[in-house]
Image (cartoon, helix red, strand yellow):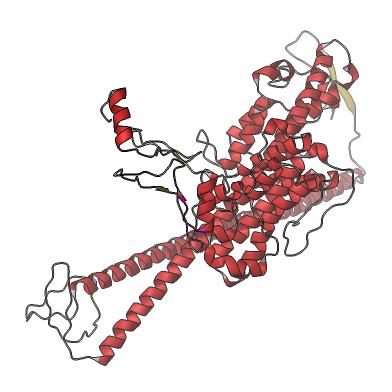
Amino acid sequence: KPPQQSKSGEQNKRSSSPVPSERPPKKVKIDAPKSTGGKTAPRISITGAASAAAASGTSKVSRSKSPKTTGGGQKKKATVAPTVKSNEPVPLHVAIAQVKARFPIRRPYKDLESWEGACARFFRELMKHPWINPARPKFIFHVPVPLLFPELKDSYAAKIQKPMDLTTVEAKLLQGGLYLNAQEFVDEVALVFHNAITFNREGQNLGEPMSCAYYDASIHLLRYTRWLSLEILANYLSDDPYTDEIVQDELPPTAWKLTKANRKKAREEMENIVMNERIEKSFEDDRYTSTESECEKLLKALRHQSDIKHMKFFIKMQELPHNYAAYIAKPMDWEKVNNTLRKRRYDKIKDVVEDLRLIFSNALKYNARFKGTNTVSGQAYDGAVYMSKKLEAAIDKSMLTGSDRFERERIDHNIAEREIEAAERLEKERLSELWAKEGQQNRNDPNSSRVETIETIRVVNRRPPQRKEILDFEYFDEEDDGTHELSYIEAQRQQKTIYEKQTKARGQMHSTARDAGATVFDRAEKYAQILQIAIKMQKAAKGKASANNEATKTNSSANQYVEQSVSMVLSELEKKDRAQIRLQPKILKRKTKRKVAAVSLE
């Protein structure tokens, strides 16, 4: 800090050596770095003049407007605005400032018309997407491509007739008068991603990782923009029954009309993605997976404290009416759905949604006859109407976020796999080139000695390498004369290769032995079952045969006895001097007092 001087001393100094009074450039604010503890960097805001100078590539010197100095006064150095050459890439924040500088008028959101406010809300929701979030974007659609990639300027202009970026679209909306309705705004937002698809199609066909990543991301973002615009701009949809058709290769429509028919079709697309998604199950009492978390969000959407007076009838059904089964085939409540999800018994998200809808459809069906009454059933009917609407709103929101999340995860997985394959391919090419170079050197000069550096630098004069088979165990040569056929590093590499091969072979052997053992035990178990079945069938056959033999013997003996007895009676009756048959009653004595008369045949 300069020392303070008196007013008279300052006046004398000014009269002797006048110094020009310089002013800092307007709208330029550079905050001094403060002690932030290593968390945040000092904020630097760039003016529109600085960004324009960076775009034009010319250095402009800002001079003071005070009169020039006369006499022996020293001139101060003029401040130079930041400049960027036209053929060099521009940082993203500088490029965004350059684009915004082209549209000086920027109305606040409260001054926008109704449809403009809806478009602004749709744009803000779109910019919250993890891939294009301005804070940490994964893909750049915010500024024109030639600003960030000057080397692509000619090729981009040859393929794209009407360039467009997200910052330009937002600036045109806030300036006003450039869009007549929401349809024109949505068309230009869709044009951003359509241009990216067109430009990266050729690279995607050739298999370039960057082009493939931008191609897949642009397709998903175009589809997500369509879904989001038809949901947020629902109040500005027309009743036109026209629906956009898929043009080629199952790509989403590059431009769509804001109609209710298109909104219905978009919801069907989201339902096909979300409802058929299989739930990735975790262990019970463990943390939920991503798909299980989506189902849990639907359950939590019905348990807000403000909705307790409507939801209290459907949380847990203690006692059912006596005639409830006559109306409802499958009772359902919130606690039952929650317990089923907690026990990981749901296979698809569709199953959870169907059970939640069943809760309120059962209530509407059973309590329909009490509609409009001031009874418990009437209150339950009104609560079912209110909560069913809230459930459908939660499902619509889950459809939008879930479809975006599942598609985004699939594309991220494909991008990661392509990057790994590209890295492996580059490493393989590098190694093949290195081996070819080493082989060429050996063929050109086979007898010359080579100088190698091995950890600590030492000179090894050795013969040409004659690769021999390295054993699995360490082998010591007692007659070592100091010359080694393989260097230390090459030996380590070969030992590592052999160890990896042995580990892989051992794993294959274990898996083969395990499969063979499982096959043998499976066949043995089946053979034991077959033997048991055969033994049972043999015993059953023997039992039937013995029973038939015994029945045959019994019938034959009985017939013989009958025939003998009949023949004996007939022969006795045919005798002439036989005694006559008399019937004489005989009284039998019993222990009881009652006497029973019996007839005996003598």
Is 413 on the left or on the right of 17, as rendered? right
Q: Which of 174 and 451 is in front in this view?
A: 174
Residue at (20, 87) in percent of width and height: 464
Residue located 35% across and 33% down the image: 34
Q: Observer-nearest residue: 357 or 161?
A: 161
Position of the C terminus by quadrant: top right
The image shows residue 251 at horizontal and vertical percentages of 72, 60
Residue at position x 73%, y 54% in the image: 548
Tell me if I can see residue 547 in this picture.
no
**Where residue 442 sits in the image (x, y, percent)?**
26, 87
Specify whether 55 is left or right of 72: right
Answer above or below: position of 121 versus 534: above
- Residue 410, compared with residue 7, is above or below; it is below
Q: Give the range drawn in magenta.
A: 57-61
- View extreme (top): residue: 593
Q: In this view, does 185 lie above or below 587?
A: below
214 relative position to 26: left or right:
right
Considering depth in this image, is 33 or 261 the residue closer to the camera? Answer: 33
Left or right: where does residue 193 sit relative to residue 490? right
Q: Quadrant of residue 361?
A: top right
| Residue 242 lies in the magenta stretch | no
* Figure quadrant of the N terminus: top left
Please state which of residues 260 and 333 is positioned toward the viewer in this rendering.
260
* Whether residue 376 can be seen here: yes
* Main SS category, magenta section: loop
Q: Is residue 570 above or below residue 466?
A: above
Residue 176 location (% of width, % of height) = 73, 42
Instruction: Tell me which corner region of the image, top left, top right, bottom left or bottom right, holds residue 438.
Output: bottom left
Number of callouts:
0
